[in-house]
Image (cartoon, grey):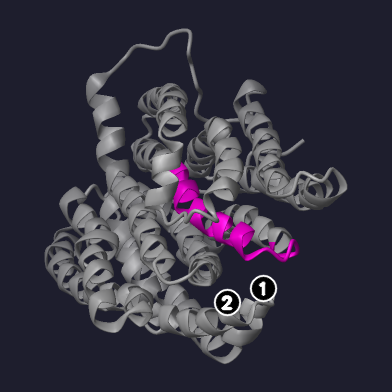
Amino acid sequence: MIKKEKLDLGKNNINSLLLKLSIPAITAMLVNAIYNLVDTLFVGMLNDTNAMGAISVAFPLFILIAAIGQMIGIGSSSLISRFLGENNNKKANNVASHSFISGALISIIFTLILILNLNPILKLFGATNNIILYAYDYSKILVFLSFFNIMNMVLNNMIRAEGNSKYSMIGIILGAILNIILDPIFIFTFGYGIKGAALATGVSQIISFLFLISYYIKDKSIIKINLKDFNFDKNLLSNIFKIGFASFCRQGLSSLSLGLINYQASLYSEAAVASIGICLRVISIALYVILGFNQGFSPIVGFNYGAKKFKRVKETINLSIKYTSIFSIFTTIVFFIFSKQIISLFSNDLEVLKIGTITLKAFGLLFAFTGYQQVYSVLFQALSENKKAMLLSLSRQGIFLLPAVFILPKCFGLLGVIFAQPLADFLTIILTYILSKDFHKDFDKKIKAA
């Protein structure tokens, strides 16, 4: 039996809190990346560039599904941590109930929409005539089982908001281990090919969901999901979505822009689609570490801000930027030195290897600043600075990236497709600096007045 681990977010050492909350969250996020990465590795063993291209095309769709769960999960997590900081467990319970019900309903509606429009979506995301059949077989299974993916995101964030991130971590790790075991069985032993990869992922997510929901069924939680006495609160639900909407925009735009990158790459070759898809998965592993760290960072900031302990908020911000920046710089070095070796893990195709090596180095150009940028993006969400959070979310994957994806290829061909993301990253870093300076001017006044 896993015991509740109660951490005092308002008194415990900040450094210790960050490590205790972020390490399990990082593990959980990495496991999410592994779901896709393991599929890519095993599908790569089929030695079929079209099958690898199908996995690449489905990746933006996977991000879009996860964006729904993250929107509700992050919105509820922020409110739950703040209400717990105010010692208002009743409101925290009400948030949990609203999040669970809305997550379930939206996931069902979203699944129906995707199923009815799957082929045109896949073509929009770069599926060529050679790739489309593989992409459809793989994606339709993931879409049918997307309820469990979305609800896992919601439950993970809610459990983490009350300080018990170890439980959610174990649930997700359980799913990842199953995915690794089931992938070769379904793909090779049963001969399902690319369909087997999707089935392995779906079954693994179902097991994770059962484990996570048992946390509430067996009454292990501090907050409660009370469906019997549920009373719809329009304002509360609106607040959940307002806070989480920035996250949805960030991931939703990421899905759209990555799909458009795939589409532009498909104008050159299937190998270009496959190589860029591999690089996106590799870069997502590093990004998920930062996102996982920030999931530990967010409840600490939210709790202390709610408790008006502004000095602790500032200390949390500074330490988080330090840790994520060190990791980001290290990751950039690895991408530059070992780019060819990393791509060769997924494909032996010479064209994929050539394009992938260039792409991974390009994507790593400004990754050193990703930690800094992401900390402020999450900070603005956690403190309900919704306009700033929204602006940052729209900028990197929308305002800056979308025009770059359309304009640069006209001037530089495939290199323009590859360098669209680094250009968007550069402009987003500048915007983050401007918004952070503005934030600290007002926040420093609060510290002095406290």
Verify whether residue 47 appears in magenta. Answer: yes
Which residue is at a point 55% across and 43% down the rendered structure image? 136
Depth check, front residue: 141 or 68: 141
Query: In the picture provided, is 190 more to the left or to the right than 105?
Result: right
Q: What's the residue at 19%, 57% (across, down)?
A: 391
User: How many residues crowd around disc 1 within 10 Å: few (fewer than 14), some, or many (20 or more)?
Assistant: many
Magenta stretch contains residue 71: no
- Amino acid of disc 2: Val
* In front of the other: 105 or 363: 363
* The C terminus: image quadrant: bottom left
**Where is mark 1, residue-wise?**
347
Q: Earlier in the sequence, mark 1 or mark 2?
A: 1
Please give the range of residues in magenta.
44-67
The numbered disc on residue 285 is none
Q: What x and y, as percent, mark residue 314? A: 30, 66
Position of the N terminus, as image quadrant, is top right
* Marks 1 and 2 close (CB-CB < 8 Å): yes
> Mark 2 packing: few (<14 Cα in 10 Å), some, or many (20+)?
many
What is the residue that sits farthest to the bottom in this orientation?
337
Q: Could you say where residue 410 lies in the image, as x and y percent from the top left?
A: 24, 76
Q: Does 368 sit left or right of 43 as displayed?
A: left
Q: Which residue is mark 2?
A: 352
Report if residue 67 is visible in the image: no
Q: Is residue 45 left or right of residue 402?
A: right
Furthest residue in direction front, as rendered: 129
Q: Is residue 110 above or below residue 299?
A: above
Residue 106 x, y percent position in the rendering: 40, 27
